[in-house]
Amino acid sequence: RKEVEQDPGPFNVPEGATVAFNCTYSNSASQSFFWYRQDCRKEPKLLMSVYSSGNEDGRFTAQLNRASQYISLLIRDSKLSDSATYLCVVNLQDSGYSTLTFGKGTMLLVSP
Amino acid sequence: DAGVIQSPRHEVTEMGQEVTLRCKPISGHNSLFWYRQTMMRGLELLIYFNNNVPIDDSGMPEDRFSAKMPNASFSTLKIQPSEPRDSAVYFCASSFDRLYQPQHFGDGTRLSIL
């Protein structure tokens, strides 16, 4: 089983739509979680951290479900500029060092 | 603020040649990571340094790959000899080595081995 799994998509949505992505992780000892965004031919950039109680940043909402070992990202009122690949990232601290494991990403295409 | 700086941005070379990729992490960050990204395999961690010491190099594909971090502000990833299957985007990232701290990526080096 892969450590971090995401639906590769693409998710095709019209402007203004609400879209949600899920990501599952296999290691129950995982301790922190992030969503990164990667534009075509660019580097991954941190979108938001995911906190246990869930958190919101403008149109973006992240949720964590430790019991089921998944995190989610909800995007409301999609913009054309939201088109990108969204990477789920899980952090595990082992032997005193932190390691990040990246999912392969979910592609979002927002159309006019 | 300067982010992670990588060079070169693009490299095209013939198979068998030595390739050296360079990275300057964000000042003050004590962890540095080298990744490789391809369409097929996604983002793969190659090696991870903490306080200039290699901690985990299990992702380094084979002996042709080597990485060094001689000081806190510089790291290199070397491929010798290079092969066409090494063609990929290579990213360097840095962070504070504490839980809940995200990584910050450089622009990447697009490597093509002919």
Image (spheres, coloured by chain):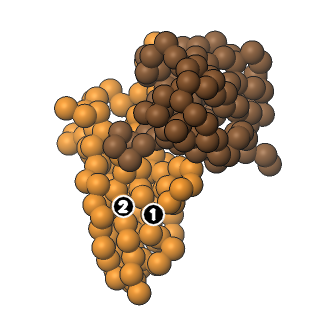
Chain colours: A orange, B brown
Q: Residue B96: x and y, percent?
A: 64, 30
In the rendered image, residue A4, in percent from the top left (x then y), is placed at: 30, 39
Q: Position of residue B15 (x, y in %)?
A: 53, 30
Report the disc number at residue A19: none
Q: Is residue A7 left or right of residue B23?
A: left
In the rendered structure, find residue A84 and report the number of the disc placed on it. 1
Provide residue A31's location: percent of width, then percent of height: 40, 32
Q: Amino acid at mark 1?
A: Ala
Q: Is residue A48 visible?
A: no
Q: Nearer the viewer, residue B100 or A13?
A: A13
**Mark 2 — residue?**
A107
Residue B108 drawn above or below residue A100: below
Mark 2 — on which chain does it sit?
A: A
Callout 1 touching callout 2 (CB < 8 Å): yes
Residue appearing at x 38%, y 71% in the figure: A109
| Amino acid bearing label 2 | Met
